[in-house]
Image (cartoon, grey):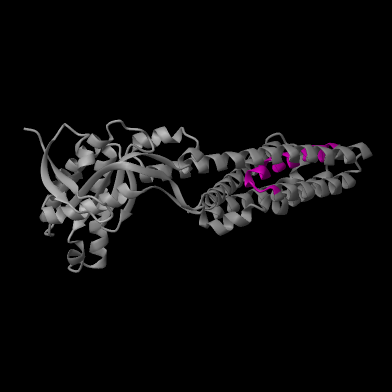
Amino acid sequence: MTMEDHLRVALREAQLENARRINIVRAVGAGAFTLAMLFSVYVLQDKEWELILVPTSIYFLMSLALAFGGKAGPSILTLSRFSIPVYDMPTVLIIQIINLETAANPESVAEFTIAVYVCLLMLSAYTLNMRHVLLAMGVAIICEQVLQNAAESTLMSRVLSPLVFGIATWICVYAGKSRLELVKRVTQANARRLRLQRYFSPGVGELLEERDEDSLALGQECELTIIFVDIRGFTSLSEQLSSREVVELLNAFHAHMVEVMFRHGGTLDKYLGDGLIAYFNAPVGQPDHAPRAVRCAIDMEKELMFFNEKLKSEGKAPIRMGAGIHTGSAIVGDIGAPHRREFTAIGSPVNVTSRLEGMTKEVGRTIVASAATMELVDEVEWESLGSYPIRGVVDPVELFSPVAKS
């Protein structure tokens, strides 16, 4: 999913959530006005409000219906975003025109309605759609002019009300743009965090969150220690399993191996079906990248033992793996089409590592490392396996297998 897709989804979710809030605010506000009128009519015996008590109560009930109806699905919520200019403002106009019949000062009713419409304009900003706000402003101006005409308001009042609505709309548009920018920044941060979590260990991901996005996109050449891990004999093994069992096995295997890899601070390059490639020393420098990689491979072998015990307890066949390790200079960066890039390593060391993993079958070892890696790691003992020709390499490569120090 591209950044634009993430932003579109986040904006859609924010608009729907705000539509729910608008419906709740409307219901609460209409309920408060209805209670105030009930108190005035039946407790204070103020008959001036009696005429609009019924339409206000109907408005409150309709607002409740919108608030609860919004829970039925996103389609109703989407339609309710138009409710302020289409439903609220005309309803307020009708109620206030009725109110004019008994009002002692009709002009004060029209002036009070300006405040109500301003509140509705501010509420419309939460739709996060500037067209809705502008539509609400137009409806507010028309409704207020109709009301002021009925109230026989002064010319100054009729001129000032559109000005008030214009200022309120400008504030709402500015607030809406600020909120959209906030949604965009949060979405970009979340998308970047998810992307970092895909490739990097949590500790490395936290460091990279502080970096500029462009620093990851630019390619850089650096020394890497690369691990290539693969399940041995997976093709024949998969023929004995259903499609679902194959996927479950691969997901479980990768989950165990990646957890070990992240534990040692490695970077996940990519999954290759039944295998994976990881490397150390990029994008965050690790002076001990070779020892980290070797320790990681050894711990992967140990983790596989626990994984096989679990498979055995479930009545499933154990699996074997091979791991090749090599150190060399490669290029790392964000590579691919603009809409689908991957942070990856390219170069001869990547290909050599893949060949070394294939050699594990020939030499009968789980872990095979090149001399370039062996020379950088003195915390384990090494068993020389001899020199072998490697496709893509001119001279034979001497292979070694790590042996834990006694």
Q: Main secondary structure of the magenta part?
A: helix
Residue lying at the far left in this picture: please name it. 406
Q: Residue 13: x percent and y percent?
A: 53, 49
Q: Quadrant of the C terminus?
A: top left
Image quarter of residue 273: bottom left
Magenta stretch holds residue 331: no
Q: Residue 134: x percent and y percent?
A: 74, 48
Q: Is residue 192 visible?
A: yes
The residue at 30%/56% (across/down) is: 272
Residue closer to the observer: 255 or 76: 255
Magenta stretch holds residue 112: yes
Tell me if residue 276 comes above or below residue 384 in the rendering: below
Span highlighted in magenta in the image: 108-130
The residue at 59%/53% (across/down) is: 65
Left or right: 159 as drawn, with respect to 178 = right
Q: Residue 174: x percent and y percent?
A: 69, 38
- Number of numbered discs overlaid on the protein picture: 0
